[in-house]
Image: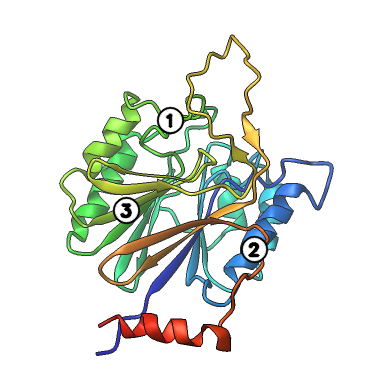
Amino acid sequence: MTASPVLRIGQLTDLHIGFDRTSAREANLIRLEAALALLNEPGLQPDLILLTGDLTEHGDGPSFDQLAAALAGCGVPVWPIPGNHDSRAALLHAFPHVVTTDDFVHYTLDLPGLRVLMLDTLDPGRHGGAFCDRRARWLAERLGEAPDTPTLIAMHHPPFAAGIAWMDTHPDEPWVARFGAAIAGHGQIVGIVCGHVHQATTTRWRGVPALIAGSTAPAVALDLRPIDADAPDGRALIAGTAPGLALHCWDGTALISHLFTASPAPALASHDGRMTALLRAMAAERP
């Protein structure tokens, strides 16, 4: 029996291109290029890439143009959604293949054996997420029209708290309840992938596997203590870790997500004659 081909979906999030307006080769652009180079390595190349928000720092046209130019040579389709730092109009101008039918940048990707629903949680002027009645109705309709098709949901803001107090979504925010009601009872959802928090995190939310991919821009420091905005305590808020990214693999029955960083990683062992006996022994143990 021939195994079904595995669909590979790259996820890049929180790129924040244009953070340093004084340099055409800013650090965030270089970090993005490192993540793209890693995704182009043999054995990792995705079939498509999802950009899950905060693609730019200021939402301006030149930053989006710079981002589009950086992605032009990646060789696979790129599908973006906005984050709280972005502008819908500038995003749509830079990515004209993205089609949306109303005021929101939400749309459907029909892939081999998998449907991806790209959601828009932007509320201009607000740091946190939003999911109004119109967006909730759109999502419920899309889920209702294909109840038997495995479906992945991509969004910028996570609907759950990751434990990093100053960045977290509060579980009592009205938009969270609205989003939860829209997905309730739809058993075809195989996962929810998000960004925003700049820290790789996984959980189950309302019975659905959910994750936050690491950011290509610098990470939010992992500190799980409560925080008081009016009482500075000197803790680190942003950490200079390597660019983060994710690769989601759909084999027709399960979604397997790899969360990793684009950091230098010299090979400590290679597929050469010294490893042949071990590889043969391990292969012989399998059915």
Q: At 35% from the left edge and 25% from the top edge, which residue is drawn?
A: 173
Residue 244 drawn at (x, y percent):
57, 52
Q: Which residue is mark 1?
A: 163
What distance separates the C-alpha of mark 1 from that of mark 2?
Answer: 29 Å
Q: Residues within 10 Å of mark 3 (few under 14, many from 20)?
A: many
Residue 39 in view of the camera = yes
Q: CA distance from mark 3 to mark 1?
A: 20 Å
Q: Earlier in the sequence, mark 3 or mark 1?
A: 1
Three-letter amino acid code of the residue under disc 2: Ala
Please state the horizontal and vertical placement of residue 279, each as a whole percent of the image. 44, 82
Comparing marks 3 and 1, which lies closer to the viewer? 1
Residue 68, visible in the rendered structure: no
Q: Residues within 10 Å of mark 2 (few under 14, many from 20)?
A: few
Front in this rendered view, residue 29 or 120: 29
Can you name the residue that lies furthest to the right here? 22
Q: Which of 6 and 69 lies nearest the eye of the viewer?
A: 6
Report the residue marked by disc 3.
Answer: 191
**In the image: residue 152, left or right of residue 233:** left
Q: Secondary structure at mark 1?
A: loop
| Of pointers 1 and 2, the one earlier in the residue sequence | 1
- Is 133 placed left or right of 238 in the picture? left
Q: Is residue 98 left or right of residue 132?
A: right
The reply to whether callout 1 and callout 2 are in contact (CB within 8 Å) is no
In-front residue for pair 76/145: 76
Residue under pointer 2? 265
Q: Quadrant of the N terminus?
A: bottom left
